[in-house]
Amino acid sequence: LAQRKRAAEAAQQQHRHDHHHHHTGSRMKFNPNVSSSRRKSRKAHFAAHSTARAKLMSAPLSKELRQQYNVRSVPIRKNDEVQIVRGRNKSEGKVVQVYRKKFVIHVEGVDREKANGQTVKIGIHPSKVVIKKLHLDKCRKQLLERKNRETLAAQGKFTDAEVSRVD
Protein backbone atom coordinates (compact mmCIF):
# COMPACT_ATOMS: atom_id res chain seq x y z
CA LEU A 1 0.00 0.00 0.00
CA ALA A 2 2.76 2.43 1.00
CA GLN A 3 4.47 1.68 -2.27
CA ARG A 4 1.31 2.41 -4.24
CA LYS A 5 0.85 5.65 -2.29
CA ARG A 6 4.42 6.67 -3.05
CA ALA A 7 3.94 5.90 -6.74
CA ALA A 8 0.74 7.97 -6.82
CA GLU A 9 2.52 10.93 -5.17
CA ALA A 10 5.36 10.67 -7.65
CA ALA A 11 2.90 10.59 -10.54
CA GLN A 12 1.10 13.63 -9.13
CA GLN A 13 4.35 15.57 -8.85
CA GLN A 14 5.28 14.54 -12.36
CA HIS A 15 1.84 15.66 -13.56
CA ARG A 16 2.22 19.01 -11.83
CA HIS A 17 5.57 19.44 -13.52
CA ASP A 18 4.14 18.57 -16.93
CA HIS A 19 1.20 20.88 -16.39
CA HIS A 20 3.57 23.77 -15.81
CA HIS A 21 5.16 23.37 -19.24
CA HIS A 22 2.16 22.12 -21.14
CA HIS A 23 1.76 24.85 -23.79
CA THR A 24 5.34 25.50 -24.84
CA GLY A 25 5.34 22.53 -27.20
CA SER A 26 8.53 22.22 -29.19
CA ARG A 27 9.38 25.93 -29.15
CA MET A 28 12.50 27.08 -27.38
CA LYS A 29 11.67 29.12 -24.36
CA PHE A 30 13.86 30.03 -21.42
CA ASN A 31 11.92 32.76 -19.67
CA PRO A 32 8.81 31.50 -17.88
CA ASN A 33 7.33 35.02 -17.83
CA VAL A 34 7.04 35.13 -21.60
CA SER A 35 4.00 33.50 -23.07
CA SER A 36 4.05 31.77 -26.43
CA SER A 37 0.29 31.68 -26.57
CA ARG A 38 -1.13 32.94 -29.87
CA ARG A 39 -4.13 34.43 -28.11
CA LYS A 40 -2.04 36.42 -25.64
CA SER A 41 0.43 37.69 -28.22
CA ARG A 42 -2.38 38.83 -30.49
CA LYS A 43 -4.05 40.61 -27.60
CA ALA A 44 -0.78 42.27 -26.64
CA HIS A 45 -0.27 43.37 -30.24
CA PHE A 46 -3.71 44.85 -30.87
CA ALA A 47 -4.17 46.31 -27.41
CA ALA A 48 -0.73 47.93 -27.43
CA HIS A 49 -0.65 51.65 -26.61
CA SER A 50 0.94 54.28 -28.80
CA THR A 51 4.54 54.09 -27.55
CA ALA A 52 4.51 50.31 -27.64
CA ARG A 53 3.17 50.49 -31.18
CA ALA A 54 6.02 52.80 -32.11
CA LYS A 55 8.37 49.98 -31.13
CA LEU A 56 6.30 47.35 -32.94
CA MET A 57 6.41 49.53 -36.05
CA SER A 58 10.11 49.10 -36.70
CA ALA A 59 11.58 48.86 -40.17
CA PRO A 60 14.89 47.38 -41.32
CA LEU A 61 17.71 49.65 -42.44
CA SER A 62 19.21 49.44 -45.92
CA LYS A 63 22.48 47.52 -46.29
CA GLU A 64 24.54 50.71 -46.43
CA LEU A 65 22.93 52.18 -43.31
CA ARG A 66 23.20 48.87 -41.54
CA GLN A 67 26.95 48.80 -42.17
CA GLN A 68 27.28 52.45 -41.21
CA TYR A 69 25.49 52.19 -37.86
CA ASN A 70 25.82 48.48 -37.13
CA VAL A 71 22.09 48.45 -36.38
CA ARG A 72 19.58 46.20 -38.10
CA SER A 73 16.24 47.98 -37.58
CA VAL A 74 14.78 51.04 -35.89
CA PRO A 75 11.26 52.25 -35.12
CA ILE A 76 10.13 54.22 -38.14
CA ARG A 77 9.30 57.92 -37.92
CA LYS A 78 8.09 60.81 -40.03
CA ASN A 79 10.58 62.20 -42.56
CA ASP A 80 12.53 58.96 -42.91
CA GLU A 81 13.07 58.10 -46.56
CA VAL A 82 11.98 54.57 -47.34
CA GLN A 83 11.81 52.12 -50.21
CA ILE A 84 8.77 49.88 -50.42
CA VAL A 85 9.98 46.39 -51.23
CA ARG A 86 6.75 44.34 -51.17
CA GLY A 87 3.38 44.60 -52.86
CA ARG A 88 2.34 46.53 -55.95
CA ASN A 89 3.32 49.97 -54.64
CA LYS A 90 7.07 49.47 -54.94
CA SER A 91 8.63 52.91 -54.89
CA GLU A 92 10.74 55.27 -52.83
CA GLY A 93 9.56 58.25 -50.87
CA LYS A 94 9.40 60.13 -47.62
CA VAL A 95 7.27 58.96 -44.70
CA VAL A 96 4.58 61.62 -44.26
CA GLN A 97 2.72 59.94 -41.43
CA VAL A 98 3.17 57.07 -39.00
CA TYR A 99 -0.40 55.93 -38.39
CA ARG A 100 0.10 53.97 -35.20
CA LYS A 101 -3.59 53.34 -34.71
CA LYS A 102 -3.71 51.31 -37.92
CA PHE A 103 -0.16 49.94 -37.73
CA VAL A 104 0.67 51.51 -41.10
CA ILE A 105 2.77 54.33 -42.49
CA HIS A 106 1.88 56.73 -45.28
CA VAL A 107 4.55 57.34 -47.89
CA GLU A 108 4.76 60.38 -50.14
CA GLY A 109 3.32 59.65 -53.57
CA VAL A 110 1.74 56.36 -52.55
CA ASP A 111 -1.96 57.08 -52.91
CA ARG A 112 -4.95 56.15 -55.00
CA GLU A 113 -8.00 57.87 -56.40
CA LYS A 114 -11.32 57.06 -54.83
CA ALA A 115 -14.39 56.71 -57.03
CA ASN A 116 -15.42 60.26 -56.14
CA GLY A 117 -12.06 61.68 -57.23
CA GLN A 118 -10.61 62.06 -53.75
CA THR A 119 -7.06 60.85 -53.30
CA VAL A 120 -6.30 58.72 -50.24
CA LYS A 121 -2.95 57.58 -48.93
CA ILE A 122 -2.30 53.87 -49.08
CA GLY A 123 -1.17 52.43 -45.77
CA ILE A 124 2.03 50.38 -45.86
CA HIS A 125 3.20 48.14 -43.05
CA PRO A 126 6.69 49.17 -41.86
CA SER A 127 8.01 45.61 -42.16
CA LYS A 128 7.49 45.88 -45.92
CA VAL A 129 9.82 48.85 -46.34
CA VAL A 130 13.54 49.44 -46.07
CA ILE A 131 14.79 52.69 -44.57
CA LYS A 132 17.04 54.42 -47.10
CA LYS A 133 17.72 57.62 -45.19
CA LEU A 134 17.18 58.31 -41.50
CA HIS A 135 15.79 61.54 -40.17
CA LEU A 136 18.37 62.18 -37.46
CA ASP A 137 17.98 64.21 -34.32
CA LYS A 138 19.50 63.94 -30.87
CA CYS A 139 17.18 61.17 -29.65
CA ARG A 140 17.62 59.16 -32.81
CA LYS A 141 21.42 59.40 -32.64
CA GLN A 142 21.36 58.25 -29.04
CA LEU A 143 19.13 55.35 -29.99
CA LEU A 144 21.49 54.28 -32.77
CA GLU A 145 24.49 54.52 -30.45
CA ARG A 146 22.64 52.54 -27.81
CA LYS A 147 21.64 49.81 -30.25
CA ASN A 148 25.13 49.73 -31.71
CA ARG A 149 26.62 49.28 -28.24
CA GLU A 150 24.20 46.44 -27.60
CA THR A 151 25.08 44.70 -30.86
CA LEU A 152 28.79 45.14 -30.14
CA ALA A 153 28.30 43.75 -26.63
CA ALA A 154 26.35 40.81 -28.03
CA GLN A 155 29.06 40.18 -30.61
CA GLY A 156 31.65 40.34 -27.87
CA LYS A 157 29.77 37.81 -25.76
CA PHE A 158 29.31 35.56 -28.74
CA THR A 159 32.99 35.51 -29.68
CA ASP A 160 33.96 34.86 -26.04
CA ALA A 161 31.61 31.89 -25.99
CA GLU A 162 33.09 30.64 -29.25
CA VAL A 163 36.62 31.01 -27.91
CA SER A 164 35.80 29.01 -24.78
CA ARG A 165 34.15 26.38 -26.97
CA VAL A 166 37.35 26.03 -29.02
CA ASP A 167 39.26 25.12 -25.84
Image: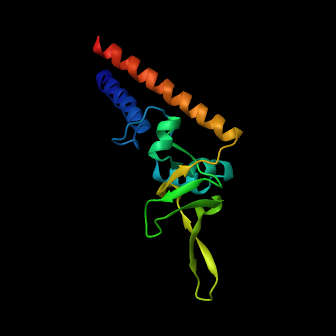
Q: Residue furthest bottom?
A: 116
Q: Is residue 25 above or below residue 129?
A: above
The residue at 42%/36% (across/down) is 29
Residue 108: percent from left, percent from top = 60, 66
Q: Is residue 146 above or below residue 123?
A: above
Quadrant in the picture for residue 98: bottom right
Q: How many discs mark residues in the rendered view?
A: 0
Residue 51: percent from left, percent from top = 67, 48
Q: Is residue 3 above or below residue 151?
A: above
Let me know if residue 36 appears in the view.
no
The residue at 37%/27% (across/down) is 9
Which sits in the foreground, 52 or 27?
52
Quadrant of the image containing the C terminus:
top left
Residue 85: percent from left, percent from top = 44, 59
Is 55 displayed left or right of 152 in the figure? Answer: right
Colour basis:
rainbow
Quadrant of the image containing the N terminus:
top left
